[in-house]
Amino acid sequence: MSRKILIINTGGTLSSVMKENGLAPGLSTFDMQKELHIVSGDTNLEIEDFCSLDSANIFPEDWSKLAERISQVRNDYDGIVVIHGTDTLAYTSSMLSFMLRNINIPVVITGSQLSITNPVADAMENCRCAIHMAASGIPGVFVAFNRKVILGCRASKVRSLSFDAFESINYPNVATISSLGMNIDTNAVPSRNGVFQLSNRYSTEVCMLKMFPGIHRSLLESLQDQGYKGLYIEAYGIGGMPFLKHDFISTVEKLIKGGMTVVVGTQCRYEGSKMDVYETGRRALEIGALQAHDMTSEAALTKLMWILGMTDNPSEVRDYFSLNIAGEYGKSICL
Ligand code: ASP
């Protein structure tokens, strides 16, 4: 029996058309149905419009509603494909990995660098890969792009123009497509261990900051005054921060003492943090900063938003953050 797949469209370049003020989403799934059916193979395809946004206009409330919609229909389909703009796709795929933890079907997010109306676009190939993965029966949240399938919480947009826009960071690809067909690496699929339960609350009192020589500590202090509860810092190298002439670490300590959760990661794309090596990292660990290890910035930030949506208690946040929820960190089995 052919697999039943739902395509949910949120917009992005894939569905874009040239408008008066530049390229913007404009095609509905109805407008794209011919192309989508061409690449759907023997699946039984249904289509649905969720929104029509450039992904720069996607916000956490959209993640929450999208997760709710997927949760509502998850038992009616064998798999779901979400069409999304590429710019914030990795944030969405990371957050959906948490909100839809233990989902029982494949949820595959895709987009493209050129509109589906362009005859040389990557759009149809990406949809083909996404639909094929959605029909695979392998549950989880994934990103399909340029003949690769990436675990949703490991994806990052690494190129702004090329078709090969996404990479799996610090983690193997879940699947690749070659002349041998789609090859799925089942070892790269985290095992489900628990029943699915929609968990789509979040906090927006979370800030992300990139460290740079010359950064003012007052910037950090103002976050507390504004009521932020969480901060993710993209620090240097394996997680270093200044503590001499400009004592950033003692400012972070003040924030932590005031109840804020501070997570420190790295601005290097690959290989993650290891804060116990240098004094610049170890001091931050000693004052209570958490480290992101090999998580992407997209996963670390959304994980913090997600956890702070459930609890404000700093020690609970710390405990939750150390768990591997959806395969976002380490090589171990998810909890
Ligand atoms: N600006 C577009 C978006 O993120 C880019 C794309 O989809 O490739 O919606």
Image (tube, grey):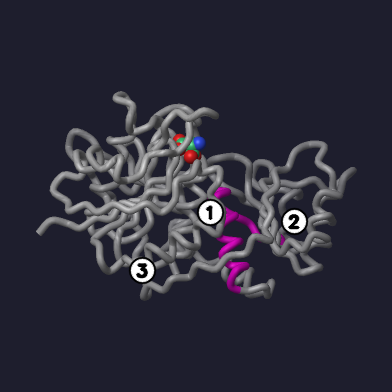
- Residue 157 in view here: no
| Callouts 2 and 3 close, C-beta under 8 Å | no
Q: Which quadrant: the C terminus?
A: bottom left
Residue 265 percent coordinates (x, y): 63, 50
Q: Secondary structure at mark 1?
A: helix
Q: Secondary structure at mark 2?
A: helix
Q: Mark 3 or 1, which is nearer the eye?
A: 3
Q: Is residue 200 left or right of residue 103?
A: right
Q: Quadrant of residue 231?
A: bottom right
Q: Mark 1 or 2, which is nearer the eye?
A: 1
Which residue is denoted by mark 1 in the rendering?
Answer: 299
Task: Specify whether tag 3 is near ligand 1 (CB below 8 Å).
Answer: no
Which residue is denoted by mark 3 in the rendering?
Answer: 72
For marks 2 and 3, give the CA distance.
Answer: 43 Å
Q: Amino acid at mark 1?
A: Ala
Q: Amino acid at mark 3?
A: Gln
Q: Is residue 214 left or right of residue 159?
A: right
Q: Amino acid at mark 2?
A: Ala
Which residue is denoted by mark 2 in the rendering?
Answer: 284
Q: Is residue 14 left or right of residue 258?
A: left
Q: Is residue 290 above or below residue 161?
A: below
Of residues 83 and 138, the one drawn nearer to the viewer in this rendering: 83
The magenta stretch spans which residues? 289-310
